[in-house]
Image (cartoon, grey):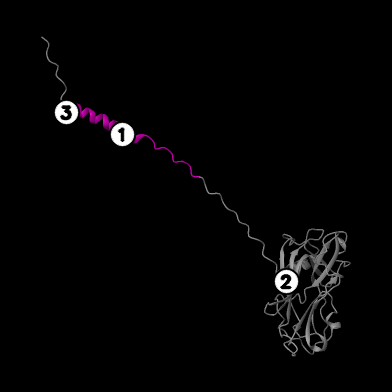
Amino acid sequence: MLEPTVSPCPSVVALAASLLLVSACQREEAAPAPAPAPVAAPTPVVTVAPSPTLDRASLLQAMDLAASAFAAGREVGGASLAGRRFVVRQAFGCGGPAPSPVQANANEGLPALTWGEGRQSLKLSLAPGDWSQSALIADDAETWEAAEGFWLARPWLRAEGCPAAQGDPLAQGQAWPQTMGLAAVFKEGGSRTGRRNGRAYEFTVRGEGDQPPVAPSQGYRLVLEGRMAAFADGRAIRCRAASPDQRPVCIGAVQLDRVAFEDADGKMLSEWRGG
């Protein structure tokens, strides 16, 4: 006679099931977590600050360095100024109108303030100098058809306004020769827009009603604006000297875009564009 089969005790079955569940959980916890997807690094943005525009002070400083290097027989270090923008302001008429137009125009390339006919108006004028045959331009004569010159008066004064120093009435001295300037150059066969060909820039200031104008104590301002060009050696400034004991004369080659007359407060009186 067969004996009945005895099933395991329910408590034993539950215990075995619990052990299997714990073992499965341990295997799941031991499995490594999947690596996170790589995050693309942001593309760096590189910004290049534009070169600052040259003003009177910075341009004269560059010419001082060029003059020193020339006198020492060395090359000017650093990057060339060719291609840099410039805006140069120069005070003139600080001592009032010149006694006569002849004296005012004694130096071409310098702005002048004179009385008009009958002292009923003030005349602002600037006649560029013809520097095409200058020794400073001669090496580039085949490249440039013309060079019209503008002197930077009182190069020891970096400020754009009138000088404050008063002259000594007991001192007998002559006007210091011009040693720094800008040459507006025009390529052979290039555009002639902006060339003056001996014609002066002129503007007339008139008074109110029948009253003549009053010459301002702080004079007027000449504004020269454009971009530095380059000589054959790639430099924007060139210096020459007649002897080792003379201060070198330095000029910058430029493409002139704008010439203007302003009053001492910066109000524009007249302008010429297209150089």
Check disc 1 and give the amino acid type. Gln
Q: Secondary structure at mark 3?
A: helix
The quarter holding residue 104 reads: bottom right
Check disc 2 and give the amino acid type. Val
The furthest residue to the left = 1
Q: Disc 3 versus disc 2: distance between alpha carbons?
A: 102 Å
- Above or below, comparing residue 114 to residue 256 in the picture: below
Q: Earlier in the sequence, mark 3 or mark 2?
A: 3
Check disc 3 and give the amino acid type. Ser
- Above or below, comparing residue 29 to residue 126 in the picture: above
Q: Name the residue tied to disc 1.
A: 26
Q: Name the residue tied to disc 2.
A: 88
Q: Nearer the viewer, mark 3 or mark 2?
A: 2
Q: Secondary structure at mark 2?
A: strand
- Above or below, comparing residue 88 to residue 2 in the picture: below
Instruction: Specify start and end residues of the magenta stretch as a single range.
Output: 10-39
Q: Name the residue tied to disc 3.
A: 11
